[in-house]
Amino acid sequence: MRLNDILAPRAVRHLPKISSKKRLFCELADVAADVHGLDRASAFEALQDRESLGPTGVGDGVALPHARLSGLDRVRGVFFRLDAPLDFDAVDRRPVDVIFALFAPEGAGVAHLKALALVSRTLRDGALLAKLRANGDAPLLYTLLTEAQTSEAA
């Protein structure tokens, strides 16, 4: 699995500010609906339900919200880079500014876990995070994400 298998260029956004975690989940659901054809309300509710089990802020300003939904054929992703970090109850208590959301089919146990591992591994790269944080152009953010994985595989 590669990032460009789950992340479409149109699903990458640079946003100046999000006012709350709930608003973030609304925006993620909107993009997932527009780009991947997901039901907005179901995507939002699934993200909220998963987050109620425990925060998905993994540290170093990164959050990996994820949810399982019926009607999906494969794992899909949405990436946001925020100018103003958002309080997210992350494990290290730092606000987040890099968000990679995953939406997986209900029965995609291994595929969902592989996608989470791939995104987590990619976003643990400090040099990549610095480049993502230094850029606000969505096509460039997409390129940085997908090329980072390609160079790791080489």
Image: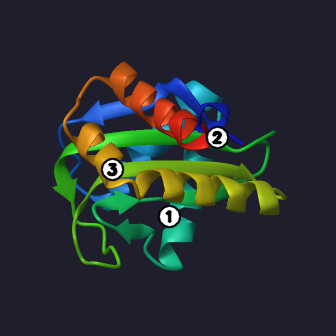
Residue 12, image x, y percentages: 43, 31
Q: Distance between the Cα atoms at labels 2 and 1?
A: 17 Å
What's the amino acid at mark 1? Gln
Q: Distance between the Cα atoms at labels 3 and 1?
A: 18 Å
Residue 123, image x, y percentages: 42, 53
On residue 76, which mark appears? Answer: 2
**Image quadrant where one finds the C terminus:** top right
Tag count: 3
User: Nearest the camera: 129 or 77?
Assistant: 129
On residue 48, which mark appears? Answer: 1
Which badge, 3 or 2, comes first in the chain's sequence?
2
Q: Residue furthest right?
A: 107
Q: Name the residue under label 3.
A: 98
Query: What residue is drawn where x is 49% and y is 76%?
Result: 52
Query: What residue is drawn where x is 29% and y is 65%?
Result: 60
Which badge, 2 or 1, comes first in the chain's sequence?
1
